[in-house]
Image: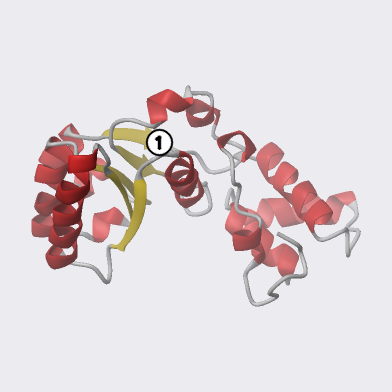
């Protein structure tokens, strides 16, 4: 996407990685074979700006599955059941649905329980993202059917890579000296989204 196209879109969204190898700072996940990530259900646990949503989107794009995003704030059991019914229909054609739920810890017990039958019978594959410890926030039944992957806050090396990519993407509109760039990275505190918001400002 061109850096100048649709200036209302946040820079972090414009620069969201499209391939797993473009994700930085999470080698414990990006080093895994893609085939391992294309099966089973996952809970991505990590701080803001660590890449949870980006990785889920990449897996949705690279998978042959239909990709559906749910909001843990706006969607309830009724929406989950609708997806389950659709998943059962397309399962007849040997297809399935990948459901991404951001901030999945905001789902209450009944919402989490509603996910279980579809995960169990394989008609949907779940990727949940959370900033909270899943052991305390998610039902044990849901945890037993998913694999928790811990994402780390991005270190200075990863944030510097993202900063340099932003400069290339924006065709280097500014030149920060090294101390200022280091301060910007430090203020970002491991959050790529915050860093790119600051660059955009």
Q: Quick check: can you spot residue 19?
A: yes
User: Quick one: SS at disc 1?
Assistant: strand
Q: Position of residue 54 (x, y in %)?
A: 51, 49
Is residue 102 visible in the rendered structure shown here? no
The residue lying toward the viewer, choosing from 100 and 28, is: 100
Q: Quadrant of the C terminus?
A: bottom right
> Residue at coordinates 14% horizontally, 44% vertically from top-left?
118
Residue 55: image x %, image y %?
48, 43
Above or below, 125 relative to 12: above
Query: Is the N terminus in the top left, top right, bottom left or bottom right quadrant?
Result: bottom right
Of residue 91 and residue 20, the one placed in the foreground of this image is 91
Q: Position of residue 63 (x, y in %)?
A: 42, 39
Could you say which quadrant of the image residue 93 lies in? top left
Does residue 132 lie above or below 73 as drawn?
above
Q: Is residue 135 left or right of residue 172?
A: left
Disc 1: CA contacts within 10 A as few (<14), some (14-19) or many (>=20): some
Give the residue number, with chain letter if any, for mark 1. Answer: 150
107 relative to 19, above or below: below
Q: Give how far across and how far down residue 166 sits, in percent.
A: 76, 54
Residue shown at the point (55%, 28%) measured from the top left: 27
Quick one: 177 or 71, which is closer to the camera?
71
96 or 43: which is nearer to us?
96
């Amino acid at each position: 996407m061109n850096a100048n196209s649709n200036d209302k879109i946040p820079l972090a969204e414009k620069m969201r990685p499209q391939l797993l190898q473009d994700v930085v700072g999470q080698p414990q996940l990006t080093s895994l074979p893609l085939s391992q990530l294309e099966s089973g259900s996952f809970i991505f646990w990590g701080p803001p700006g660590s890449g949870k949503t980006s990785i889920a989107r990449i897996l949705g794009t690279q998978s042959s599955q239909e990709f559906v995003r749910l909001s843990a704030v706006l969607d309830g059991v009724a929406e989950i059941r609708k997806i389950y019914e659709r998943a059962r229909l397309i399962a007849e054609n040997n297809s399935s649905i990948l459901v991404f739920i951001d901030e999945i810890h905001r789902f209450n017990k009944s919402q989490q329980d509603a996910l279980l039958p579809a995960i169990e019978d394989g008609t949907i594959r779940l990727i949940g993202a959370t900033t909270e410890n899943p052991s305390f926030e998610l039902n044990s039944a849901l945890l037993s059917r998913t694999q928790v992957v811990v994402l780390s806050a991005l270190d200075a090396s990863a944030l510097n890579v993202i900063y340099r990519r932003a400069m290339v993407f924006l065709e280097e509109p500014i030149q920060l000296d090294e101390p200022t760039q280091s301060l910007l990275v430090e203020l970002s505190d491991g959050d790529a989204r915050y860093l790119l918001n600051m660059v955009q400002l």
